[in-house]
Image: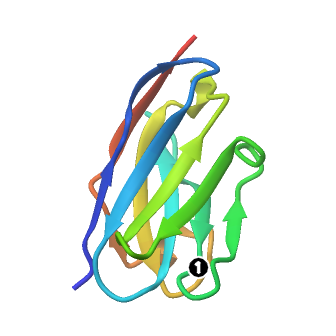
Amino acid sequence: QVQLVESGGGLVQAGGSLRLSCAASGRPFTVGWFRQAPGKEREFVAAISGNTGITYYTDSVKGRSTISRDNAKNLVNLQMNSLKPEDTAVYYCAAATRITVRPPDYSYWGQGTQVTVSS
């Protein structure tokens, strides 16, 4: 059984930083971060593969965010810098068998954590 629990969300001013963490139980697999703002569809943010450590980012966060995994602690972290008001959303981590940007390809999801960036 795969369980995912996010933490690290909060309120931050524009230009600030946050680190989101996803505690992931179970075997190594690809972990992706998604976000959903009110009235918008869930969108892909970043992902890291379980075996190779290959990473992939959506263009809007590339250069501002870093996804990494700490296998000893079963954590996948998303460090987000230079945050903008448009980054405001509920952030979810999810597990899949391969790197993909499509939400339906992820079989397991966490409950989400709110990130609010004030201008």
Residue 92's quadrant in the figure? bottom left
Quadrant where the N terminus is found in the figure: bottom left
- In the depicted structure, whether residue 83 falls above or below residue 90: above
In screen coordinates, is 19 left or right of 58?
left
**x, y percent for residue 31:** 49, 71
Q: Is 25 in front, or is 46?
A: 25
- In the depicted structure, whether residue 45 falls above or below residue 90: below
Residue 51's quadrant in the figure? bottom right
**x, y percent for residue 81:** 63, 35
At x 71% / y 41%, what residue is drawn?
Answer: 64
**x, y percent for residue 71:** 43, 76
- Can see residue 42? no
At x 25% / y 73%, what residue is drawn?
Answer: 3
User: For the residue marked with disc 1, what is the amino acid?
Assistant: Ser
In screen coordinates, is 104 left or right of 75?
right
Which residue appears farthest toward the top when viewing the image? 119
- Can see residue 35? yes
Q: Which residue is mark 1?
A: 49
